[in-house]
Image: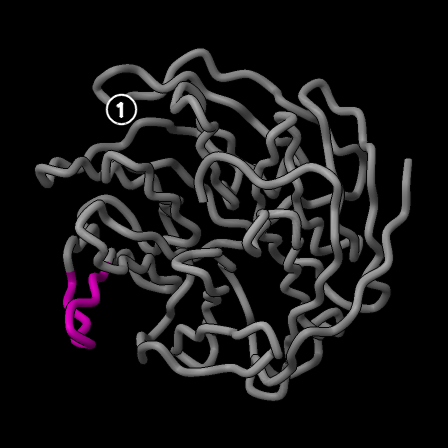
Amino acid sequence: METLQTTVLCEGLQFGEGPRWHDGRLWVSDIQAGRVYTVDEDGRLEVAVEARGASGLGWLPDGRLVISTLGRPYVRCVEDGVVTTLHDLRELGWSLNDMVVGPDGRIYADLYLEPAVPPPGALVLVTPDGEVRVVAENMRTPNGLAITPDGSTLIVSETDSGLVLAFRIDTDGGLHDRRVFADLGAGRRPDGMCLDEAGAVWVGSYITGEFLRVLDGGEITHRIETPGRSAIAPALGGPDRRTLYLVVNDDKNPAMELATRRGHIETTRVDVPGAGWP
């Protein structure tokens, strides 16, 4: 296992989540601040939009930004700077969390059924024509989501079990053939993720304070430590998709008030570029 070192790109987040590389920039949610930021190569944060509870980010084929919200089950859409609710899923559950949007406009999102700790969950699909349906049930806190480059597989971190799971995506967007992609081992709790061209997953384990590169089958090839802090979510970006961006939050102390928590983004360079979605 290789250990990588990082540098801090920017500070100023309260509770960062959902980093995405899009249109030549890094985008990141700040759940506590209720904002989506863009980050330039010098680490300057710019508010892209104000959106309460912003968590997962994605883009529809027509270029509109869509946002999933934590603490409420809404998929929101941003058009000309105006945020509207695209889908209200209160009939299905209590909250959404992360989200991935594929190239065809299909949206997959975590659905939390009730405000328990940890929350029982499911995965929900929103199709381009507006159909909404649950496509995976009995999930132990689903979290980070990614779609492979060929569009055949959805990979999801299941935080409460410590597993990374994989599903086959059917032609209608349904999910089948659930299997274990990787068991991260005792004590690890997978959060956000991204994929690379070799089929490996970069995933944050927030409770153990580390980012891991994991192969299908469970072999860990690389590790990045974030001692005393939560490793939340990675994204592979830059012109060659070989810059690894890491959202790290200083919330390891459970007594820390949410409003006083702080987050930042670190970077490092990797050999294998990003692939798939997000």
Q: Secondary structure at mark 1?
A: loop
Quarter of the image with the C terminus is top left
Q: Main secondary structure of the magenta part?
A: strand
Circle count: 1
Residue at x 70% of width, y 55% of height: 206
Residue at x 39% of width, y 59% of height: 23
Vertical arrangement, residue 71 with respect to residue 108, above or below: below
In the rendering, at what x and y percent does residue 96 appear? 36, 53
Magenta stretch: give its range: 76-85
The quarter of the picture where residue 123 lies is top left
Q: Is residue 178 magenta?
A: no
Vertical arrangement, residue 135 with respect to residue 24, above or below: above
In the rendering, at what x and y percent does residue 224 appear? 82, 52
In the rendering, at what x and y percent does residue 176 appear? 38, 14
Q: Is residue 266 left or right of residue 73?
A: right
Residue at x 60% of width, y 43% of height: 159
